[in-house]
Amino acid sequence: MNAQSDQALLSWISSRQSWMLEQTQQLAQINSGTFNAQGVSQVAQALVEIARPLNAQVEKIALPAFRTVNLNGEREERELGPALSLIKRPDSPRQILLCGHLDTVFADNDPFQQTRWLDDERLNGPGVTDMKGGLLILLTALMALEQHPEAEQLGWRVIMNPDEEIGSPCSADLLREAAETAKLGLVFEPLLPDGAYAGERKGSGNFTLIVRGRTAHAGREIENGRNALRALCDLIIELDNLNGRRQGVSINPARFHTDVPLNRVPDLAVAQFNIRTQSHDDEHWLHQQLSRLALGLNGREGYSLEIEGSFSRHPKRLTPANQALFKLLCHCASTLEIPTQIKPTGGCCDGNNLAAAGLPNIDTLGAEGGSIHSADEFLIVSSLSRRAQLTASFLLAVARGELDSVLWPHLNGG
Ligand SMILES: [Zn+2]
C-alpha cells in the first residue's frame, strides 16, 4: 500500500534536517521564559510562519492572567503570552490532538540565552530540547503527512501553550476542551534522559502557607509577640516528616520568607512547597494533613494559617488504550530501527492534563537530549529528523485505521 509514498515521506523528512536545525536554533535564541509574554508571543508568530505550508486554520488565543500568591503573602497577577491553535480537517472522522509548549524555564534576565555547539552532534541552548526542537518535530511530521495521499483520513488540532513550565494553570481549560474533541493525544516533550518514553507520570501540586502572628519589639516586649517564622518552621518540619509516610508521595518544602527588621517579632511568614502524588487518593490525603496542620495552628492564640494552592496535575496511569498506542508506536519505531523502552517518571507535563480529560496519549515524542531546565541543556541534533520520521509514520498508521478498534470502534474496520 503506497510503499512509494511512504518512502517519499521519510526521504522528504531527511531532506529537511538542516532546515529543522536552523529553525530550532532561531527559536531558541528568542527568549520565551514563561513570564516574558512578548518573547512567547514572538515565538508564536515565528511558528505561524513556519506552519504556513500546512494551510491550517490558525488562531492565537489570549489566556487569563496567571494568579499567584507571592512570598509576601500578596496576591499577584501576571500576564502571559498567547496560546497557538492550528486546526485541519475538523470534520474528519478521526480527530487527534498534538501539543507542545512555547515557553521555557529561562527568564529574560537569565544568562543562558544563546546556542553553542558542544561537538558535532550536540547543540547546547535554552529550550533546544525542551521543547523548541520538539515543536519542529511536530510541525515537520505534519507537513510530511499532508503531502501523503492518505492524510485525508485524519483531522488534527495543534495546541501550543505559553505556560507549561509553570504547570499550565492558565491553558488548562483550553487543553481540556481540545482533549474532549479528540480521541488521541501526542505531546512533544523530550524523551527521558536515557532515551525512554514516559509511561506513568506522577501528579503535582504547588502550595503556599501563609502564617500570621503578632509583631512586638524584640527587646521591650518579646513575650507579647507571636513569632510567625517560628510557627512556620514547625509546620515545615511537620510537612517534611510526611515524606516516607505514604507510598509514592513526596513533599518538597522549597522556599520561605519573612521581611522584618531584626528588632521586631515577625508577624508574617510565607513558605511554598511542591508535592508529587501517585494516585488520586493521595490528593485527599494531603488535604487531610493540611487541614490537621491548619486546625492545630489556628487553635493557638494569636496565630492563623492560610493555605493557597492546588493540584495542577493529576497522576497519569497507563490505561489499556495507552498501551495500545505504545504498541503501535513501538511497531513504527522498529521499522525505522529506533529502539524503544517505556518507563514511569516523577515528572509531569501536559500528558497528565490530557489523561485527566480522558484522552489516551503519548507525551514524549519530542527530541533526544538531556540536562533540560539547566544551562547544560543539549539537543542531539540528528534526533530532529529521526523523531519526525517516527511521528509521521505513526500518524500515517493512525490515518490507515490501525488504532480504529481501540479509539474509533464505530468506523469501518474497527
Ligand atoms: Zn517541556
Image: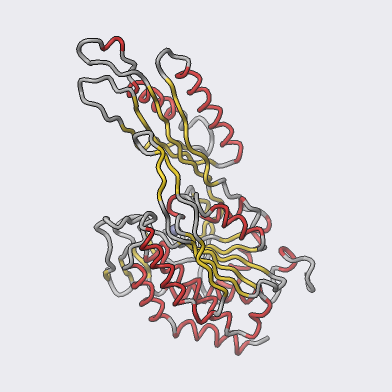
Which residue sits at x=74%, y=66%? 408
Which residue sits at x=60%, y=60%? 361
User: Height in image: 314 above or below 230?
Assistant: below
**Quadrant where the image shows the N terminus:** bottom right
Residue 47 location, quadrant: bottom left
User: Height in image: 336 above or below 179?
Assistant: below
Foreground residue among 273 and 120? 273
Q: Residue 25, percent across and down?
A: 34, 72
Residue 398 location, quadrant: bottom right
- Give left or right: position of 288 versus 71: right
Q: Residue 173, percent across and down?
A: 57, 53
User: Height in image: 300 above or below 267?
Assistant: above
- Give left or right: position of 405 versus 258: right
Residue 20 location, quadrant: bottom left
Q: Residue 147, percent across and down?
A: 57, 85
Foreground residue among 77 and 290? 77
**Quadrant where the image shows the C terminus:** bottom right
User: Height in image: 173 above or below 127?
Assistant: above
Ligand 1: quadrant of the figure: bottom left
- Give left or right: position of 217 versus 129: left
